[in-house]
Each structure stands twice: as C-alpha cells, then as structure tokens.
Amino acid sequence: MPVRLLLLALGTFAMGTDAMVVAGILGPVSADLGVSVPAAGQLVTVFALGYALLAPVLAALTARWPRRRLLLTALAVFSAANALSALAPTYGLLLATRVLAAAGAALYTPTANAVATTLVAPERRGRALATVLGGMTVATALGVPLGTWVGRGDWRLTMWLVTGLGAAALAGLAALLRDLPAPTAAPTLAARLAPLGQRRVLGAAATTLVFFLAFQSVYIYLATAVSGATGGDGDRLSLILLTCGVTSVAGSWLGGRLVDRLGVRRVLLAGSAAAACAFAALPWLGRTMPGALAYALVVPLAGWAVSVALPHRLASIDPGSAPLLISLNSSALYLGTAAGGVAGSAAIGALGGRWFPVAAAVLAVVACAVAAATTREERSGAAGAASAGRSAGARV
C-alpha cells in the first residue's frame, strides 16, 4: 500500500480521534476548569458545529489552492489548535481552540479523500478512499480509548497526543506528497447547497441529522451514563470505549454487506430500532460492567451499520453527483453531532445522569419514523418509474 495513502489516513485518524475523544475526558476537563460535565460536553458540540458550517464555506474559498498546500495548511492549523487546547487556561479559550481545530479538520478531510483518488490507478480508487476513510474508523476503535486512557489523570495529555498525531502526518506529507495534479473546477457554495432543494435529498439528509442527534446525545455523555458501572475508574471507561470502537469497525464492515444484501431501507429501520431499544435499556445496563459492555456491543454495531447506509442512500439518488451529495451527508452528520451535545446536556439537566438516555430512545424512534417515511416515498417513486418504463416498453 502506498506510504502516502497511509500518511493521509494518519491525518484522518488524528481528526477522528480529536472529534470524539473529548467524550472520554469530560470528567477531568470539568474538574480542572471548574465547569459542569454538560458544559464540558459542549466542546464536542462546537467542534461538530464548526466542522458542519465551515466545511462547505472553506471548500469554496480554497477551491483554487494547490492540493498539497491546502493539506499542509489544514494539518498545521489543526495541530496548532490542539496545542492551544492543551495550553488553554480557561473554558472560554478552550472552546475557541475547538472551533479552530474544526476549521483544520473541515479543510483536511474532504481534500484528503480527493487527493487519495489521484494517487492510484482508476481501478484502485475505491480502495484508496477506504484506506483514508478507514483512519476515521480506526480512530473510533483505537484513538478514542487510547486518548481517554492517556487523559484519565490529566486531560491536557490527550490534546498533546492529538497534536503529535497531526504533526506526524504534517511532517510525512510535507516530505513525500509532491507532484499532485492541479485542482479541477470546484462547485460554488450555492451549487453545493442546491441539491437540498430536492425532496429526496432533503429527506435523506434529515434522516442523517436526526439519527446522529439521537446517537451522539448518549455517546458524548457515555461516561455519565455508565458511571454506575465504572465508579469513576478511567481504566473501566477506557475498556467500554475500546469495546465501542471495535464494535464500530465490525458494524461498518457488516453494514456494507447488509446494504448490498437487504437494501438501505431495511438497514436503516432495523439499526434505528435496535439503537432505540438499547438506549431505553441503558439506565439499567449502565449500572454494571457486564451491562455496559453489552450496550457497547449493540449500539455501535447498529449505529455504524446505519452510518454506511446513510451516504449510500444519498449517492444512489444521483450517482453522477455522489461526491457532492456525500459532502451534504457529512454536514448533516456533524450538525446532528452538534445538536446531540446540546440535547444530551438538556436531557441530563431534566432527567438526571441515569435516565437521560431515555430521551435518546425517543429521538431514535423519531429517526426510525423519518427513515420509514422518506424511504417509502423513494420506493414508491422508483416503483412508479419502473412501471412507466414497462408501459412505454409495451407500447413500443
């Protein structure tokens, strides 16, 4: 496998770790900066919201930049932002550095995917994309639990770990990534957002947003939800997060195969329903380690299977515009993550640390209903088109 692809994947590994590792160190951040755990959870919210809002804007502003310069600039901004996070003396400054880190990630990830396709022969582009995107999956499996373990005593060490990962990717790509083709004409910001005017695209994006709103409203505050099982022990929490990560990889692998075999609709409905049931059971499962580990086996498996089905659904609407539609899916995903941070915080305030996952169960049911309604319309439209095609063929 080309070393340059692995370096691009190292960058996405750093981005994926940074996006979610804060969920594992909310306790130390809260204690050090003198804020509540729900307030500390907003660090994930501002990162996700910053990514969702900045990605299309920055892509339009930097469309004419050489790809190498763009990648190195993104990694430099990202690494510097995490170093500033590690040094931030106050909660307000830490929030600001999270937005800066999101800007670096929003610049890097789409560009890395595009560059990966130029480094290999056309018949190997799918595998090249899978390698780069795999950095995000491995971050869930290894980066988040590793960062949680490193930061169990001092959360700033976790930020230095992410800084080191970003700097390593920056150094490697600066040395080895050369002679890239010039960027092709990129769509304007208006063109990027235009597909949202299509009912099917809007329905698919809405499904992504609501599902991740439900999913992340628990994941961001998982340490609170399983506090009965961990008793505040960082090693136990790391084990639960590691289990979540490994199961996420399995869910991603399984989701691709289930979508091919069963179709997008069935995967969306089954995965959302399974997640809703697990969220509803978490107030009891989270009281013991066996129960918490059982939860960590079910929800990531279902969630990542759904995560594969969601972009597949959007891409199938208009294969010729797949990259643009998938970028909209990413923005909806990060908006859902941002809203999940707010919703989880509000649910903890209203229901308490044990019972707040019940709110996520309700949201997951809503996600299932949205998926059922919008995919039914798509199936009806497809059936109508097929019927019209058969009638036309009969007339001929």
Image: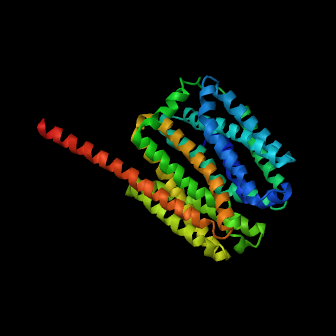
**Quarter of the N terminus within the rendering:** top right
Residue 350 located left or right of residue 34:
left
Which residue is painted at 44% across and 62% down in the image? Answer: 270
Looking at the picture, does residue 131 appear above or below residue 28?
above
Looking at this rendering, what residue extends furthest in the front direction?
A: 350
Residue 65 position within the rendered picture, expressed as x and y whole percent measured from the top left: 64, 24
Is residue 276 or residue 317 the one in the foreground? 276
**Quarter of the C terminus within the rendering:** top left
Which residue is painted at 59% across and 46% down in the image? Answer: 335
Residue 389 located left or right of residue 37:
left
Residue 260 position within the rendered picture, expressed as x and y whole percent measured from the top left: 40, 53
Which residue is painted at 66% across and 64% down in the image? Answer: 350
Q: What colouring method underlies this structural image? A: rainbow
Residue 241 position within the rendered picture, expressed as x and y whole percent measured from the top left: 67, 63
Looking at the picture, does residue 224 appear above or below residue 342?
below
Looking at this rendering, what residue extends furthest in the left direction?
A: 395
